[in-house]
Image (tube, rainbow, N blue to C red):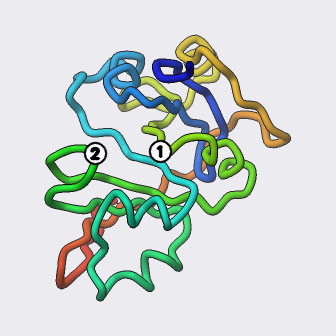
Amino acid sequence: MFGDCVFLAQSDTTAGLLSLNPQKLNVKKGRESNQKVIVTLDSFKKLKELVRIPQKHKKRIRQSAKSTFVYKGKNRLVGHSLGVRVVRDLEHREFLCFFPYVYSTSANPHKQGFDLEFALSCAEIYVMDKRGFCQSKASRIFKVGNRNLRVVR
């Protein structure tokens, strides 16, 4: 029913476009259709079903907030590295619990700042809560290796 819909929602970090179809998000934002998009989840149980987390980093990943981790190698969604963020924000998690996972990207034109008009024009369904839609600091991104974590953003 909602497989191809693009949602506009306030995430734990910034206003974002969410969908089960990553190519549709890339087209809406005006970027290459094969560009990688972050996967957003509501629980660590779902994370364990998607990727293998190295034992050395399990505690750090579980305790981190507003952080995206890129897991290299094969995973259950795509055959290459995958960026995944587990959301702790209660309002956003309530929305995410209805999906096994969603692809997420900021609600702004490619490499530009937040524009509410653009965000509203891209979305097919608006998910509004008491916070409204606003831009805030983006999530930190770490690349997970077997031995170390590397800061990407």
**Which percent across, then down, holds residue 15?**
61, 37
State the residue at coordinates (68%, 37%). Answer: 134
Residue 4 left/right relative to 134 = left
**Disc on res. 70:** none
**Which percent across, then down, holds residue 83?**
32, 53
Q: Secondary structure at mark 1?
A: loop
Q: Which of the 4 image quadrants contains residue 105?
A: top left
Q: Which of the 4 image quadrants contains residue 75?
A: bottom left
Few, some or many residues within 10 Å of mark 2 (<14, 14–19, 20+): few
**Which percent across, then down, holds residue 31?**
29, 23
Residue 80 left/right relative to 123 = left
Q: Compared with residue 107, is residue 73 higher up or lower down, i.e. above or below?
A: below
State the residue at coordinates (80%, 38%). Answer: 129
Query: As drawn, which residue projects farthest toward the right?
Result: 130
Query: As drawn, which residue projects farthest toward the top?
Result: 121
**Disc on res. 101:** 1
Q: Compared with residue 148, is residue 30 higher up or lower down, i.e. above or below?
A: above
Count of picture labels:
2
Q: Which of the 4 image quadrants contains residue 69?
A: bottom left
Residues marked 1 and 2 touching at CB (< 8 Å): yes
Few, some or many residues within 10 Å of mark 1 (<14, 14–19, 20+): many
**Disc on res. 77:** 2
**Which percent across, then down, holds residue 106?**
49, 36
Q: Secondary structure at mark 2?
A: loop
Q: Could you tell me the amino acid type at mark 1?
A: Tyr
